[in-house]
């Protein structure tokens, strides 16, 4: 369909487009995509039910969409997503910047499954100022953003938002939107908007003071105690403070206090002094993190397999004004750039508080477009940066650590980890044709350096969790001249599942599933060894490259769905065994590298070794010394000196070593 020629965005839709990757149907969708214009815009992939499952933007729609249907996009989720795509829409706009704005609106409208979004999509609280009113009021709200109202936030701690409003009104009196007298005054002014210029006189005649006015939190709008000009100054100060512009508020209040004192209006000067003291009390709650007046947002992200958390440190004038955390519905199943970029669009689409700098731990491919979008919202230039060192790097790492703790709290609170583990075990039971869920999984890995320092690790997962008390490590005893995983795996399995080990309670019970790190050769070695021992244990091999699982009963490897709990669990088991094996391998290798040529000489212990190093300084100088010079070392007898000399000259090619 040819998009209609209009001044605004143009929309087109393909009918019944089959999915990519379904054989003969692939050219059909490719032909349809070939008809898409090369203009900038947004594309919407749809499933068989017509539901939007992914929204993206592009500078060139046709080129970008072609990457999907030809699977040239290297993101892991793309093959899975394109298997369910049956249709698409696209919207043409005038620029890449307009495409970004439209993309955010479409994601908010459709909540596509494959786009990054908040996990529960709940509404977060904001502090709002009803700027369209004659006397704007402050309020705590979760409402959809309305025109004529300025929103500050979002806050993830509702109590903190309410306390901020309460404390702020003690310092700068403004009306609150829940006040009955303020609502009455608002209705009165709405009925007769022509009287706005004399609103305070009209209200003084027709209304009465509210309770907040009597306790010093309300400015007296309801009784005509303040005119629109003075009230507007209060509102501006509140907004400045919520934006983090503390110095501007303090400077203005200080000037007013001095002016009142100069005019001998000591009562007003006292009230202003009390407000300044209140601001100082607020400052005590805000940690100073920069020596300069830096204003920036620092966004740290911590990811699990299919869930993540973003933590935003809001820093204004060098102080941490607040920190907020958001749980996201994507994790390691999408790239870091896509995850951070998706969160950044969602977060700044909702907040009006945009700083001059946003610090991230990712290089975003569309950073220039995002900077333009943020600059338009802020009214001034905005820069996206990735700090590498210094105070900002330290604070960004702190934000990432906070994101990790927040995600762990969420997983414990919601039982997310337990539910996911149960699903993973049930999925493994089905995919690997097991008789029951694998409650005890043992995994083995081999680590070697061209046949030297060859070791094996055994890690155990009980009920889907690492059981470190059951971990074991083995030195491979078979002499090897080169790396041989087949022989090494056979040996370690023979030792682990030998009858005496199986009867040893320290090694635990027989596993429900045995996983070997590797492909078909490692699986063959494991099966042969188990058959020789007469054991019937379900076994599989996990290849590193494509995360394929090799099973004895099928030549075709099992491929678990990307992002599934079962794939996450089996990869976690494999990675843990690899970590445990290589740690042991490095320990042995490092120990061998620090071993001295004289350590095995009879009569040389730590004390005499220290005495020799103190006298000669290094193994090179000791090797160059004569037998008589060695014997002159205090505490070294002549026969020991002779043995040391002979040992050193039997290893002329030994490297220079220093005591550790």
Image: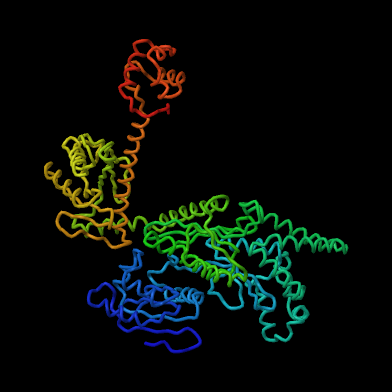
Q: Quadrant of the C terminus?
A: top left
Q: Residue at the bottom extreme?
A: 5
Q: Quadrant of residue 335?
A: bottom left
Up/down of 336 relative to 128, above or below: above
Q: Quadrant of residue 164?
A: bottom right
Side of 82 where 148 appears, left or right:
right
| Residue found 73% across the figure and 67% down from its top | 214
| Residue found 34% across the figure and 40% down from its top | 583
Side of 578 where 392 appears, left or right:
right
Residues 643 and 431: in front is: 643
Residues 373 and 200: in front is: 373
**Residue 421 pos. (x, y %):** 32, 55
**Residue 189 pos. (x, y %):** 69, 82
Q: How many marks?
A: 0
Up/down of 259 relative to 471, above or below: below
Q: Quadrant of the N terminus?
A: bottom left
Up/down of 509 relative to 305, above or below: above
């Amino acid at each position: 369909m040819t998009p209609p020629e209009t001044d605004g965005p143009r929309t087109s839709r393909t009918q019944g487009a089959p999915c990519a990757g379904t054989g003969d149907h692939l050219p059909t969708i490719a032909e349809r995509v070939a008809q898409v214009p090369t203009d900038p815009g947004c594309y919407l992939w749809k499933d068989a039910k017509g539901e939007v499952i992914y929204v993206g933007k592009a500078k060139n729609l046709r080129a970008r969409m072609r990457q999907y249907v030809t699977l040239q996009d290297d993101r892991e989720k793309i093959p899975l997503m394109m298997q369910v795509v049956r249709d698409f829409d696209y919207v043409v706009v005038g620029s890449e910047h307009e495409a970004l704005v439209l993309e955010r609106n479409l994601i908010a409208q459709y909540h596509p499954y494959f786009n990054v979004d908040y996990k529960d999509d709940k509404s977060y609280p904001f502090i709002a100022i009803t700027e369209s009113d004659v006397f704007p009021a402050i309020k705590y709200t979760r409402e959809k953003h309305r025109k004529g109202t300025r929103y500050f936030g979002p806050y993830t701690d509702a109590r903190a938002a309410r306390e901020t409003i309460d404390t702020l009104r003690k310092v700068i009196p403004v009306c609150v939107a829940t006040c009955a007298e303020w609502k009455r005054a608002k209705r009165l002014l709405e009925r007769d908007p022509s009287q706005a210029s004399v609103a305070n006189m009209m209200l003084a005649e027709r209304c009465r003071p509210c309770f907040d006015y009597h306790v010093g939190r309300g400015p007296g709008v309801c009784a005509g105690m303040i005119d629109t000009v003075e009230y507007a100054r209060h509102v501006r100060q509140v907004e400045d403070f919520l934006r983090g512009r503390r110095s501007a508020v303090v400077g203005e209040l200080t000037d007013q206090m001095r002016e009142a004192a100069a005019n001998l209006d000591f009562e007003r000067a006292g009230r202003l002094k009390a407000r300044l003291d209140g601001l100082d009390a607020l400052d005590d709650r805000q940690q100073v993190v920069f020596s300069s007046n830096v204003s920036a947002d620092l966004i740290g992200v911590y990811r699990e397999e299919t869930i993540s958390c973003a933590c935003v440190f809001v820093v204004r004038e060098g102080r941490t004004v607040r920190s907020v955390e958001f749980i996201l519905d994507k994790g390691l199943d999408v790239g870091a750039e896509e995850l951070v970029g998706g969160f950044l669009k969602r977060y700044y689409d909702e907040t009006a508080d945009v700083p001059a700098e946003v610090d991230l731990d990712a290089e975003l491919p569309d950073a220039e477009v995002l900077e333009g979008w943020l600059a338009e919202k802020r009214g001034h230039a905005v820069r996206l940066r990735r700090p590498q060192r210094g105070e900002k790097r330290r604070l960004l790492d702190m934000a990432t650590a906070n994101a990790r703790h927040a995600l762990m709290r969420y997983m414990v609170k919601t039982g997310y980890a337990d539910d996911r583990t149960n699903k993973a075990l049930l999925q493994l039971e089905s995919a690997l044709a097991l008789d029951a869920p694998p409650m005890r999984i043992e995994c083995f890995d081999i680590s070697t350096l061209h046949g030297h320092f060859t070791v094996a690790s055994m890690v155990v997962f009980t009920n889907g969790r690492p059981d470190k008390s059951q971990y074991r490590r083995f030195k491979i005893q078979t002499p090897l001249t080169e790396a041989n995983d087949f022989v090494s795996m056979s040996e370690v399995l023979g030792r682990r599942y030998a009858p005496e080990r199986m009867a040893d309670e320290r090694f635990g019970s027989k596993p429900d599933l045995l996983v070997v790190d590797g492909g078909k050769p490692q699986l063959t070695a494991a099966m042969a060894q188990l058959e020789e021992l007469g054991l019937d244990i379900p076994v599989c091999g996990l290849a590193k490259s494509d995360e394929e699982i090799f099973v004895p009963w099928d030549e075709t490897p099992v491929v678990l769905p990307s992002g599934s709990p079962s794939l996450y669990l089996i990869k976690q088991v494999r990675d843990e065994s690899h970590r445990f094996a290589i740690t042991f391998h490095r320990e042995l290798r490092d120990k061998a590298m620090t071993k001295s040529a004289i350590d095995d000489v009879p009569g040389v212990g730590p004390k005499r070794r220290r005495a020799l190093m103190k006298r000669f300084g290094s193994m090179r100088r000791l090797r160059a010394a004569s037998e008589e010079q060695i014997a002159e070392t205090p505490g070294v007898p002549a026969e020991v000196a002779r043995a040391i000399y002979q040992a050193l000259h039997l290893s002329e090619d030994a490297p220079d070593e220093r005591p550790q």
